[in-house]
Amino acid sequence: MDLEKPPTGDVRRTAYTEERGGEGCLTVAIRLPVRIVALVLVVPVRMAWDALVAAGGFLGRTVFRPLGRAVGWLARAVFVWPFVGLWRYVVVPLAKAAGWLGLLLVVRPARWVYRWVLSPAGHALAWCWARLVVPVGDALWAAGTWLARYLLVRPLQWAYRWVLTPVGHALAWCGRGVAWCVRTVVAGIAWAVSWVVRVLLVWPALALWRWVLAPVGRVLAVVGREAGDALGHAWRIAGRISLAAGRFLGTLLRWIFVEPVRWVYRTVLTPVGHVVRDAVLRPAAAAARGTGRAVRQAFASARESVRQVRADVRRALFGAPPPARPVRRPVDRREPSGAEARTLGRSTTALTKD
């Protein structure tokens, strides 16, 4: 079990300070001016960046997203839906018609030609190939193989064994001697060239790197590291300044605009609205409902009067309508009628009927 606690932020900062405590006076002299210049240059940039981020978020929520939805809907209405309709109602029916025509005009004739013309012709050609061409080809292949073996292969084997092989061995021995000579000369030239390159190029370049470029690089590294630290420090300070300025502006805007509007809404507009609602709107709505109810009743009574007058005029001109004739319902012969209903002590069948 590990009983030691990890170092806190203060301990880490102290260790970092102790680690950087051995820096020279050049580093300390460069650090302060660079940090001041970086702070002066970075603070406006950071505040402008934070303002742009806030403005971009506001524009994205209020302008770009609704505009994007509208553009997307317009693009679908202009590009997608016409093509979908064209595909569904034009291309697909035409493709089905073309497929049917192709089946009727191409596939079925081609199938008939294959079955009754090409297939018999293919069988005939296969029979000719198997019975005529293959035996003749086998005979010609056997004759050509025998002639090639005794007219080409055997003479070439004899020439390779007794002529080319001795000549090749002699040429290889001569080539090994020439290669040894060339290798010796090239090795000497390479040693001389390498010594000249080392003296004229490598040693001067090594001295230039060791005594000029390395010290200058160390100085530039110190300057660059300090400049980077200064920019980071200035960026963090500018962020805090921008955050404080934003909070101040937000608080100022809230106290100047939001709180007065809220106070006016809460203490003035809400009571006035309640008074207007209770004193004006609700009585007006009740009066309007009563008026509407009276108007509907008047219209209903007028319609009833007109309907009664129309019925009286029709009766006076054409007479009263004939009484409705009773409609006889079909009786199911399988069940007894109402007069001959079944009881517990009486049967209604034909065989047991009293």
Image (cartoon, rainbow, N blue to C red):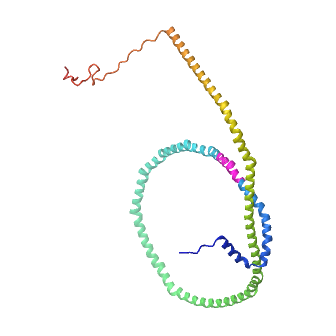
Residue 144, relative to residue 247: is it above or below? below
Horizontal arrangement in the rendering, residue 131 relative to residue 97 (left or right): left
Please give the name of the residue rendered at 78% of the width and 69% of the height, measured from the top-left corner. Answer: 35
Quarter of the image with the C terminus is: top left
Q: In this rendered view, identify the residue nearer to me: 40 or 223.
A: 40
Given residues 326 and 7, the one toward you in this image is 7
* Magenta residues, dominant SS class: helix
* Magenta run includes residue 352: no
- Residue 277 % position (x, y): 66, 33
Q: How many labels does the image show?
A: 0
Say whether residue 66 is magenta.
yes
Q: In which quarter of the image is residue 175?
A: bottom right
Residue 329 image offset from top left, x and y in percent: 35, 20
Q: Which of the two residues, 189 or 111, is positioned nearer the viewer here?
A: 189
Q: What stretch is highlighted in magenta?
A: 55-71
Residue 157 visible within the image: yes
- Residue at 53 percent across and 85 percent down: it is 164
Locate residue 158 relative to residue 25 in the image: left or right.
Answer: left
Q: At 75% across and 53% down in the image, what residue appears?
A: 249
Instruction: Give the residue drawn at x 75%, y 66%.
Output: 234
User: Camera-side residue: 57 or 208?
Assistant: 57
Is 340 placed left or right of 108 in the picture? left
Task: Locate residue 66, reporting x and y percent.
Answer: 66, 47
Instruction: Give the percent coordinates (x, y) of residue 123.
Output: 40, 57
Q: Is residue 61 above or below residue 131?
A: above
